[in-house]
Amino acid sequence: MADLTPDIFRKVAAYLNELPAYVLVDLVHQIDRAMLTEDADPAQQMVRRSAADMLAAKGAWGPLVAEPQDLALSAIIPFRVDIETEVRHTGRIEAQYIRTIWRELLRDDTDDDTSLTHEVRRAARGIARDPTQLGDQLAELRKTLATRLAALQDRLSGHEPKSFAQIGGERAGENLADIVAISSLAEELDVFTAALDAEPALGERIDEAACTQLVEVLSGFGDDQIVYPLILLMNRLQAPGSLVYLLTHNRETDEPEKLGRGRFAVVGEVLLSELDVLACHARAMVGSWDVDALADKVHRFDDIAANFAAAVDLEHPSDWSRRLAASRAMIADALRDPVEQTPRLLRDGIRPGGAASVAPDPFDVERAIASAKLLNLVKPKRDELALNECVGRVCTAVEVFLDNAAKLLPEQARAADEATLTALKARFDALYRVSGVLFGEDYAAILRRSGEVAGLRVAAVDDSDAA
């Protein structure tokens, strides 16, 4: 096979760019089907990736039709989680099992006109030719999938012992059961989503009026089905913790034991399982220092935990109080170490006490800014995150350090030669950016003026740091 040189990449991309969307669909689907049974070589992977990118550029429907698995199982996308929790939660489809289930679904499939492969490809072609048909095509495909998935579940569970090992074991079987349930409810869930879309306020938070309305809208779901629309609802709420008021609606009690016997007791399960998922995500994300992505998880955790604790009496031991405490401990343990590293990371990024002629490493500067963002994120939520003592101690150390740096760097600059001043400017710029994150624009502006008097003009004002 020829080497995949940049020139070959460009030629392939140019060729693919000339193809109509429905031909690109055929290409990515054929390669994806081959990848289910054998490893694709680098050339196939490159072609598939390039064709999928071309489809994605054609509209919002592009990424969906470029992934046969996602197109066929589109009903489960809102329920998918990209992390595995210690205890599996109903209604949360773990991404790592979807591919193995999809492979088993197509294990004996052929590429004739009645095959599932053909049905999925036909729907993708139809959408590529006329994107306005997306809804109709998905509805038809979901009906086909519901039947195929139920048959797969029957086949795997009809053995003694059950043969879920073919798709990854018992846990994969539990995921399959949820996929089957969601697929069989796809039409009802679409109707529920349409009802939510008709009421924009239901995308923000739940109040008493919304509870009354939701009780009616949810009346068509059985007790063993209601978890699925509740997860859909929670996922779209800007204040997901407000869902707890559906749990306590029209019930003159806040005792977990009594609330757990009501029609909407599953709300407690949905919210507590979300806290577990969010805590696991936070634990996995802290090492990347992607604070902006982590912030969404922390904000959601804080909102849910605070609202749940306010609405439900957790003073007495219960399963709910134990689970909330466990999730708080997990996210606190995940965040504690990087928060405690903040003073050291600020020293590495600003280096106020080092050799004046040495500029800080840009990597260390960016890590210092990320650590400041993390501290700023955690500080107002330290009660819910069980990090009160840790954050208080770190904040004191950081304030002392930055105050000293703000005095030391201008003093060094007044006695610096031109070569040393260049390094000091870089260090002062790092100090300015970190201070803006932690203390706001007004403090940063005062610091900037202090530096300018000593000849330390900052490089530029970066508004993105404080975001």
Image (cartoon, rainbow, N blue to C red):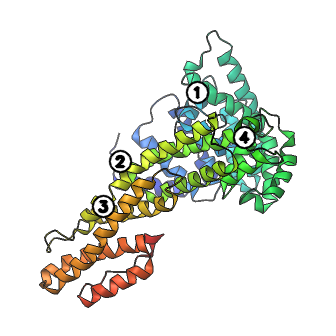
Label 2: element kind: loop
Q: Where residue 372 sits in the image (x, y, percent)?
A: 38, 64
Question: Can you give x and y, in whole percent of width and height, for residue 94 in the image?
Answer: 57, 36
Assign a secondary structure to mark 1. Answer: helix
Left or right placement of residue 447 versus residue 82 in this view: left
Mark on residue 4?
2
In the drawing, what numbered circle is on residue 416? none
Instruction: Select label 1 or label 4 by which is in front.
Output: 4
Q: Which residue is mark 3?
A: 343
- Among the two numbered marks 4 and 3 on one chain, the one whose residue lies closer to the N terminus: 4
Q: Are the residues flagged by discs 1 and 4 in contact, CB closer than 8 Å? A: no
Circle 1 residue = 172
For the residues labelled 3 and 2, the Cα–Cα distance comes to 46 Å
Give the residue pinned by disc 4.
255
How far apart in space, not on screen, are marks 1 and 4 (Cα)? Answer: 35 Å
For marks 3 and 2, give the one nearer the viewer. Answer: 3
x and y, in percent, of residue 224 in the image: 77, 32
